Amino acid sequence: MDKSIERAAKVKISTEVDALYIQLADEIDPGESVRNESFRLKTRDSEMILDFSADKRLLGIEILGVEDLLKD
């Protein structure tokens, strides 16, 4: 059985800092993101950062170096 969950996400793009943020939580209050996990992408000069709440919910995903990811 498929137990997928469908939710709307907010996507913010900043060309000034070459970043993209995918907000998965409805709202993220100041200080709610208490833990971050960062991953460098080996094939590109990019980094992915996962934001978690105190109760281990994934709040959002930030990708730095987006322009490099979109190159052929």
Image (spheres, rainbow, N blue to C red):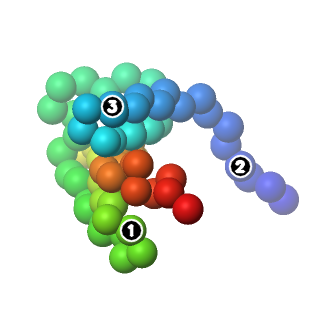
Q: Which mark is residue 14?
A: 3
Element class at badge 1: loop
Give the alpha-carbon distance from disc 1 to disc 2, as whole Å. 30 Å
Earlier in the chain: of badge 1 and badge 2, it is: 2
Relative to residue 39, is residue 5 drawn left or right?
Answer: right
Are there few (<14), some (14-19), or many (20+) residues within 10 Å of tag 3? Answer: few
State which quadrant residue 1 falls in: bottom right
Q: Quadrant of the C terminus?
A: bottom right
Element class at badge 3: strand
Q: Which mark is residue 6?
A: none
- Residue denoted by label 2: 4
* Three-letter amino acid code at the position of disc 3: Ser
Residue that appears at 38% across and 68% down: 44
Give the alpha-carbon distance from disc 3 to disc 1, as whole Å. 19 Å
Q: Can residue 23 be spotted in the picture?
A: no
* Three-letter amino acid code at the position of disc 1: Arg
The foreground one among 67 and 22 is: 67
Disc 3 vs disc 1: Cβ atoms closer than 8 Å? no
